[in-house]
Image (cartoon, rainbow, N blue to C red):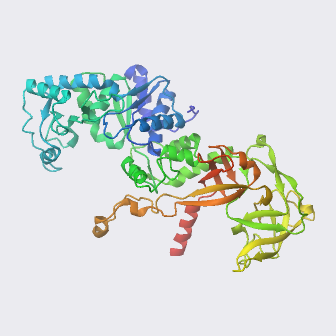
Amino acid sequence: MAETETKPVHFIRQIIAEDNQSGKFGGSVRTRFPPEPNGYLHIGHAKSIHLNYGMAVEHGGQFHMRFDDTNPSKEEQEYVDSILRDVKWVGADWGDRLFFASDYFEQMYAYAEQLIQKGKAFVCDLNAEQMREHRGTLTEPGRDSPFRERSVEENLDLFRRMRAGEFPDGARTLRAKIDMASPNFNLRDPVLYRIIHAHHHRQGDKWCIYPMYDWAHGIEDSIERITHSLCTLEFENHRPLYDWFLDQLGVYHPQQIEFSRLNLTYTVMSKRKLLELVQGKHVRGWDDPRMPTLSGLRRRGCTPEALRAFCEDVGVTKFDASIDVGRLENAMRDDLNRRSPRRLAVLRPLKLIIENFPEGQVEMLDAVNNPEDPSAGSRQMPFSRELYIEQDDFMENPPKKFFRLAPGQEVRLRFAFFVKCTGVEKDAAGNITAVRATYDPATRGGESPDGRKVKATIHWVSAAHAVDAEVRLFDRLFNVAEPDRTPKDPKLAATFNYKQNLNPNSLEVLRAKMEPALGAAQADERFQFERLGYFCVDADTKPGAPVFNRTVTLKDTWAKEQAKDSKGAS
């Protein structure tokens, strides 16, 4: 992730610049990305990675990759592996600074005993439901636990027995002793440790008590000497607790700063909901190209450069908002337009027979690889008597302004010749099975010596040389911009489930015909199929059986449809 010459100023850059100027933290910058390994990363995490790593790089500092692996019941090694792949793919380099919260369990435990000895923590026997009843409301203070005044000695004894495994799950917790009347619910004697008898992916069965995130987070930052702990806005109300823990322990104290999370339209960003989509087989897995996961975006054909450009474009603010997915799609188009070789592919083939082209003859035509990159050169494409064109590029009875192929109408074949339709072939049911045409040999390369013009250029492939391929066209996963927004109507809200908004047409699989140059395409290669969009070779590709995913269309078709609907409504 290279540093750019000019970057937009946002409030976090300003804070760090002021801290460096004042000498706070000795002028150093040390950031971290601390995901919980309970799912795959999504595009919202990309913003956090980009921000944390970017701030460290810009200021010549250090970036830490850290796993907050404090909940063994939901964490798996699969998630650890996927997260490391994704963070590296986005472009962040943690060097030798890979850490795990579980590495600090012993230190966290020692700090917890310190709080008990200071009279700032106690072992509580209330279960989860009782704790909720004692917590109070927005207008009423909470009530002290009946176990709040246990002696230091009793609390230490019980806490040590909790660690030793004497009690079942949920029997006891360790809670901080702060203020049950605080207007901030996070300060109403929060839980520090709970009992979980579960196998940990790194610690095995060594522990049966596990720290809560709020307790672990600040200690991890402190141990690693993080300077600026950059979090999303939902942790803003947790900052007083972050500060309280570190102040009570009297240890190194980083600065927590909150910024708005990235919400994207036409999808969901909750890891719980994404897991439900995977487990419910509404998608093909975490890396399904319809998912907002980083592995899904990568499989769809998005590049890390496009993702970083998108993150820079949306910026860093203090205000939560939903970002139109069209901005991500535009970032992908801008990036892929520059880098993608052009190829011809026919997604819905219709045979075109050139009546005056000799049978068995093949002409090789020159085709430009990328008009955006002259150094990309050109390739040779075979032209023969029988071709394939798109079904949509022919109409037997066209409307007035249909300029593509029709009886008596002439068009240009890309990189080839002018052709004029002479008729059609039909089956017994009256369906068109082939279009017949003649070509003008003098128009080789697409220009007519007599100066006549045509109003359309269409793409094609030679039938005898075509590569058969599977093409997967992906649309938005949901039909509405905010699929998990509960309806205002109470009757609808009572039975609402965000999965009701799933788009049943989010995936269309086609059998396509492609030019020979695509036969050797390798997984993760990207191309622009002229007139159709940007496509990526899928990992399902096998020798002789290529599979392509559409990354994004050439134009924002959704915006066009919405504008059309709006015009019709008015």
Any part of residue 454 in sight: no
Return the residue nearer the eye: 5 or 438: 438
Is residue 220 rendered to the left or right of residue 410? left
Is residue 516 rendered to the left or right of residue 308? right
Rendering quarter of residue 412:
bottom right
The residue drawn where x is 63% and y is 51% is 547
Task: Point out residue 384 in the picture as x, y percentages from the top left corner.
Answer: 85, 60
Any part of residue 407 in sight: yes
Task: Point out residue 267 in the picture as x, y percentages from the top left corner.
Answer: 45, 55
Return the residue nearer the eye: 46 or 85: 85
The residue drawn where x is 71% and y is 58% is 513
* Residue lying furthest top: 26
Return the residue nearer the eye: 446 or 477: 477
Rendering quarter of residue 23:
top left
Task: Point out residue 187 in the picture as x, y percentages from the top left corner.
Answer: 20, 38
The residue drawn where x is 70% and y is 68% is 391
Return the residue nearer the eye: 348 or 446: 348
Instruction: State which quarter of the image contains the N terminus.
Output: top right
Q: How many marks overall?
A: 0
Task: Point out residue 524 in the picture as x, y percentages from the top left corner.
Answer: 62, 43
- Relative height, residue 350 to residue 325 (above, below): below
Rendering quarter of residue 392:
bottom right
Is residue 170 rendered to the left or right of residue 405? left
The residue drawn where x is 50% and y is 35% is 85
